[in-house]
């Protein structure tokens, strides 16, 4: 029983760190945020800004990197929330666990975009949708993993009772 609470505590700590990271990124001023995105884009793209034929191509690439970052951050948050709620609730409360994960992720996404108002950046509904989709995808992955683990344990238990 104590092990369950330790796992939940670790998940909660990871969630708090991830939300802090997300909010910290949103609180960055426009210039700092753009510079950070450009650095990541250069690292991912494999070539510097100057090698792009058109400046518009570079800006589009940086924009795609920023959007992907939204989904990845919230994918991580969605996995952490899924672990927390799937471990915390009974097997029969699976719909409640999914609802809790998606509701928390959506609340964080809306708060994240609201923080951008304070940093001089404009909030976007598109970003909230990307955030939510990242968390929903993570929830689906977590459900598949939990289902596979439960199926494996059930088959193993059935094999042990037959032997």
Image (spheres, grey):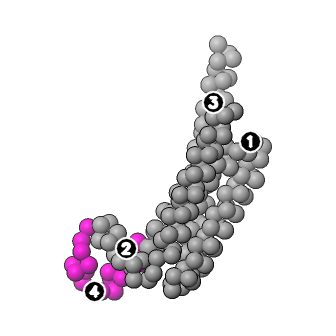
Give the mark nearest the N terminus, 4 or 2: 2
Give residue 157's position: percent from left, percent from top: 66, 24
The Cα atoms of the two marked residues, 3 and 1, are separated by 14 Å
The label nearer to you, 4 versus 1, is 1
User: In screen coordinates, is 93 left or right of 72?
Assistant: right
Q: Residue at x 75, y 52 (%)?
A: 95
Q: Residues within 10 Å of mark 2 (few under 14, many from 20)?
A: some
One can see residue 93 in this view: yes
| Residue 52 is covered by the magenta coloring | yes
Give residue 158's position: percent from left, percent from top: 67, 23
Q: Residue at x 56, y 82 (%)?
A: 118
| Picture layout, residue 155 above or below residue 66 | above
Give the mark nearest the N terminus, 3 or 4: 4
Give the mark nearest the N terminus, 2 or 3: 2
Q: Which residues are magenta?
A: 46-65
**Magenta segment, prevailing SS (helix, strand or loop):** helix
The Cα atoms of the two marked residues, 4 and 2, are separated by 21 Å
Viewer-nearest residue: 93 or 16: 16
The label nearer to you, 2 versus 1, is 2
Give residue 138's position: percent from left, percent from top: 57, 56
Q: Residue at x 24, y 71 (%)?
A: 47
The Cα atoms of the two marked residues, 2 and 3, are separated by 45 Å
Check contact, mark 4 vs mark 2: CB within 8 A: no
The residue that label 3 is drawn on is 153
Label 3: element kind:
helix
Q: Which mark is residue 20?
A: none
The residue that label 4 is drawn on is 54
Q: Residues within 10 Å of mark 3 (few under 14, many from 20)?
A: few
Q: Which mark is residue 36?
A: 2
């Amino acid at each position: 029983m104590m092990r369950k609470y330790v796992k939940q505590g670790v998940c909660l700590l990871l969630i708090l760190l991830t939300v802090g990271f997300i909010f910290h990124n949103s609180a960055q001023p426009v210039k700092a945020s753009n510079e950070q995105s450009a650095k990541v884009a250069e690292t991912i793209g494999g070539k510097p800004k100057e090698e792009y034929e058109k400046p518009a191509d570079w800006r589009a690439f940086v924009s795609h990197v920023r959007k992907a970052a939204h989904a990845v951050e919230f994918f991580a948050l969605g996995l952490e929330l899924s672990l927390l709620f799937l471990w915390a609730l009974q097997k029969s409360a699976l719909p409640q666990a999914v609802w809790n994960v998606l509701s928390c992720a959506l609340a964080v996404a809306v708060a994240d975009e609201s923080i951008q108002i304070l940093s001089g950046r404009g909030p976007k509904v598109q970003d909230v949708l990307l955030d939510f989709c990242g968390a929903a995808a993570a929830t689906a992955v977590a459900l598949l993993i939990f289902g596979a683990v439960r199926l494996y344990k059930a088959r193993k238990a059935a094999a042990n009772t037959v032997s």
